[in-house]
Amino acid sequence: MTVMAASSQLPAASQRDVVLWAEGLSKRFGGLLAVQNVSFSQYDGEILAVIGPNGAGKTTLLNLLSGVYRPSSGRLHLLGRDVTAEPMEARCHAGLGRAFQIVRPFPEMTVHENVTVGALFGKPGVSLAQARERAYDLLERTGLAAHADKEAHELTLLQDKRLEVARALATGPRVLLLDEVMAGLRPGEAQEAVELVRSVRDSGVSVLFIEHIMPVVRDLADRVVVMDQGQVIAEGTYHEVTANPQVVAAYLGTEEGLHA
Amino acid sequence: MEGRALDGSRAVVRRPDVPLRSLLPLGLFFLLALAFPFLPLGERAEYLMQIAFFTLVAGVLALSWDILARSGQVSLAHAAFYGLGAYGFALLGKVMPWFLAMPAAALLAGLISLVLGAVTMRLSGMYFAIATLAFTEVVRTIIQNLPEGAAGGANGLLVPALLGGNARAQYFLAFGILLLTALVSLAIRRSRLHHAFAAIRQGEETARVLGVSVVKYKLLAFFISSVLAALGGVLYAGKTFFINPLETFSLANSIAPLTTSIFGGLYTTLGPILGATVLRVAEEVLHNAIKNGYLVVYGLVLMLSILWLPRGLMGLLRRGKRGGDV
Ligand SMILES: Nc1ncnc2c1ncn2[C@@H]1O[C@H](COP(=O)(O)OP(=O)(O)O)[C@@H](O)[C@H]1O
Ligand SMILES: [Mg+2]
């Protein structure tokens, strides 16, 4: 991948470049402030986890990052460029990929065609033949090879989640946003998914993921951002945030609990 | 990391996008259509040639509508572009030869469709359908209220006869236009447009998150569809000598391509063409068999077959096959 070659040639200092910078993002739904003045940075090559109880505003934050929602206030910078005013497709072209929590396959396309769409339009200048080839490679990489010719509506939910990831990867992102793609996986499957995310990062992609499964967060995240009621309440390593009394309090009395 | 599969099954079977053999039925249809005028049609030849001509036009109308529908835009403005083609040809045909007036009228309709496409860009479903319906009324009203000297007003307009009124030549022209429409449809199917249209139709927001420039592709769908519909309108005008706003911009002309495509098989090339053929012939046979009330029977047959054949006639042809409709 050219992205990887380019970034591995950079001097160590600039590898810590900020790829994503949210600056006071807020989103209001009527009377509800779903995301409130959220600021954070993600560094190049970093795996960043966003955690928090249900309804904390994590998915809404991802919608602000990928451009599905316009922020009520605040700014977003992607790879050093202000993309606050840019539509979803422009952010994708600029290097932002996203897998949705509620899976959104194109139901009447085959699995392979679904991934081809991401490969074909994710970056300008890709031919259909190249995109189809790349989609086949990604199906192999994400364990969907045996299902290439199935229509997407025939997949199980777990396969749908893999498809979400494969399709987002196909767009050739520099920053990949994953929204609870491991929810519902058995421990063995979760381990495979963890391996996949690591390999994605190793290929030069920064990963921001939302996850409830705490062992996965512990294993995978370089840094953790904790949200509660729309706000960032803590930020740091896994051990720092889980020792934070405010974080413990936020999770107390919630169904999932901190150590689910 | 190279293709390491999580489920251990490394190899994936790579298939061609559009298998050539899937084009066979379509090729067969065009061969038959080409041979039709050479069949011993007997004393009813003139009548049969006329039916065949309008069957081809109905095919152009349905297939061009289907191309737009593939991008998720279920339009009720097809009569507008069909009519703009007809009127454009009637008016331009007075000042230039027919072979120039024809593409010029089509191009004009295509450009006007971009206006409609831009206005309805953010609408979907019923709101989109109603807006396109209203657009057709607006175009009809404008043409009806232009000075009589300009576009004939409510009374209508004389049209220079296509190809000197030679029925056989007219038939081959219609054949050529339908063939062109089918080739455009197939070219779309084999290109990135197919993937863009299908993605937009099946999830517009998701398509955008995956980088599809929705505005561009929706407008492109409108343009291509309207140019082809207008060519259908040219054929109609040049065959009938005389056009008027009420008949040309009728609701029936907007609904027919929709029902025909659903009946034949949506989002395919052969489906709308087959649908047009079967429905036109059925309508004619019924009309001759039951003079009064043939439309009731026709409507019933159409309704029941749409209920029973969820993927239209193409569902019968392609039973058990999946994905990649041709
Ligand atoms: N489109 C919307 N309209 C109104 N309220 C919304 C919308 N999306 C999310 N919310 C509300 O915003 C809050 C945060 O939701 P969400 O971002 O989905 O949380 P999380 O992903 O952390 O579970 C919730 O109270 C939710 O009900
Ligand atoms: Mg969520």
Image (tube, rainbow, N blue to C red):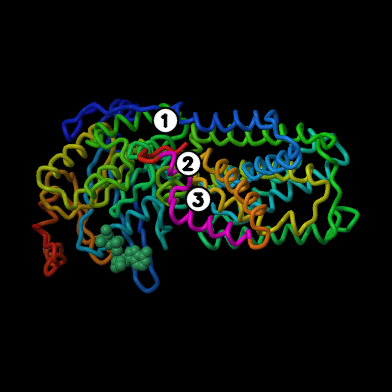
Q: Amino acid at mark 1?
A: Asp
Q: Could you tell me if the residues under marks 2 and 3 are in contact, i.e. CB atoms within 8 Å?
A: no
Q: CA distance from mark 2 to mark 1?
A: 15 Å
Write the residue at 77% across / 57% down.
B245
Q: Chain of mark 1?
A: B
- Lower position in the chain sequence, tag 1 or tag 3: 1
Image location of residue A212, percent across then percent down? 17, 55
Q: Residues within 10 Å of mark 1 (few under 14, many from 20)?
A: some
Between B187 and B213, the one nearer to me in the picture: B187
Between B36 and B243, the one nearer to me in the picture: B36
Q: Chain of mark 3?
A: B
Numbered badge on residue B17: 1
Write the residue at 25% across / 31% down.
A140
Answer left or right for B147 relative to B117: right
The residue identified by callout 3 is: B72
The residue identified by callout 2 is: B196
Q: Main secondary structure of the magenta part?
A: helix
> Quick one: quadrant of the N terminus of chain B?
top left
Q: For the residue labelled by badge 1, is the local secondary structure a helix, a strand or a loop?
A: loop
Q: Quick check: do tags 1 and 3 share a chain?
A: yes
